[in-house]
Amino acid sequence: MAAKSLYICQSCGSEQRKWQGQCPDCHEWNCISEQAVEITGFRNQKQTSIGNALSPEPITEINSKDTPRRVTHIEELDRVLGGGLVRGSAVLIGGDPGIGKSTLLLQASAKLAEHHGTVLYITGEESARQVHLRGERIDALHEDLQLTTSCDLEAMLSTIAKFKPHTVIIDSIQTTVTSQLSSAPGTVSQVRDCAAALIASAKQLGHALILVGHVTKDGSIAGPRVLEHMVDAVLYFEGDRGHNHRVLRAVKNRFGPAGEIGVFEMSDKGLTGIRDASRLFLAERAVDVPGSVVVACMEGTRPILVEIQALVAPTVYATPKRSTVGVDATRVAMLTAVLERRVGIPLGTQDIYVNVVGGVKLSEPASDLGVVLAILSAFQEKPLPSDLVVFGEVGLTGEIRAVGAPEARAKEAANLGFSQLLLPQGNFTRVQEANIAAILRPSKEGKDWQSMPAKHLSSAVQLAF
Ligand code: TYD
Ligand code: MG
């Protein structure tokens, strides 16, 4: 058994022959570290003989009807998972320290134990007493929830084999170590090999596996990117300390739509799912003030209404300041240019600030029209109607382009009591056919539902104000 020194990039997991300041594969700096690796097992076995033939089946014959899923009975989590935990699947949950990963998983484990039987929760970060105290506080105790503290992979694997739980939670993968490798916990080789062994046992024994992963400073899951390829679903917990709400987002899901989100609120009773996320984000909206507009955006398959605010003020600098929170700054710069050239609004000497309320991040072009109208409303100091919702992509010629899922956006607007919708011409027919007026709750002013299609920014501006 050879002991060997390897230089491994802690960012991407690539192996180098000598130490370097920058990783030639992922171009990160100061991430290569020397590791004494004892190469054991399958790694140095070269396969020279031909194996047994596999037995492929026609794809039409494969039975996938009953992919068994276990619902966690935490509605927002089930939605993000695509309808529950699939047997034999591996899920990776990442997020900043203290965001609520352990809290959510403890709540989910207790529910899973209550409805489906034995769940095994292995923590390498907290003592069993600590977890018990937390469980007591958030009412997440159940006798079928088996709890143990360990960092030892081999012990974990034999515990899993012995107890045969239907769900295993490892909190966290970075604290798990295998005695097969001499490198320190949390290093790439440890994380990769431990995850591979745990995933293999899940596939073999059929339990669902949830791994908690730490994130690095730039927000990606620490350890090799291969971890993300190895698991079936990757969920990220987002949200900032300043707000109580947390968003759980599926960035990859082999068993459901990626991009799906679940919204939670952190309280002293743990995390509570929020079904009506739009209401949360619009809770403190000031009406009839300039610079504020409500946009209908999609997060996964779910429509959410959020408020975009803009502030426009004459600049005191040589180059005006453009500052954004929650929307892409380059996109805002582009939209400002479109507003100047196509609608003739002189913004060259104005500082522009754009903010998405509630710490939400918008990445969809469908929020373009909202950004443009917020800037214009702030510049002209003219408020937009308080019952108006907008969506639409704005092109460089000032054209308003159609976006996906217009019916869902319109329905969400109507459900929340908005009665005017400004939308791309290209989406108008689909929204008309969805007959939104029928679901509209009669508003206080007794207004009827009105959808206003626009083809170009100049007509959108006229319709909005
Ligand atoms: P935790 O789940 O331990 O975070 P992670 O596992 O992602 O590191 O969350 C801990 C934070 O949540 C901590 O700052 C306290 C807060 N919290 C509450 O506000 N209410 C609660 O009921 C619990 C259990 C935690
Ligand atoms: Mg934790």
Image (cartoon, rainbow, N blue to C red):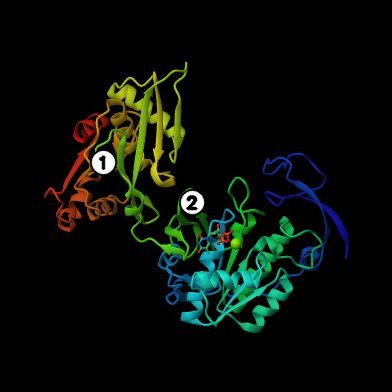
**Residue 103 visible in the displayed image:** yes
Along the viewing direction, whichever of 461 and 424 lies nearer the viewer: 461
Quadrant in the picture for residue 31 = top right
In which quadrant of the rendered image does the N terminus lie? bottom right
Residue sitting at x 82%, y 47%: 17
Label 1 or label 2, whichever comes before in sequence order? 2
Ligand 2 located in image quadrant? bottom right
SS type, badge 1: loop
Residue 151 vertical placement versus 266 (above, below): below
Specify few, some or many for label 1: CA neighbours under 10 Å numbering under 14, 14-19, or 20 or more. few
Q: Position of residue 376 (x, y in %)?
A: 30, 29
Along the viewing direction, whichever of 371 and 52 lies nearer the viewer: 371
Q: How many marks?
A: 2
Residue 261 vertical placement versus 131 (above, below): above
**Dot 1 corresponds to which residue?**
287
Left or right, 44 with reference to 375: right
Q: Position of residue 6 (x, y in %)?
A: 82, 52
For the residue with label 1, is its CB less than 8 Å from the closest atom of ligand 1?
no
Quadrant in the picture for residue 422 = top left
Residue 122 vertical placement versus 238 (above, below): below
Residue sitting at x 58%, y 75%: 55
**Dot 2 corresponds to which residue?**
239
**Residue 169 visible in the displayed image:** no
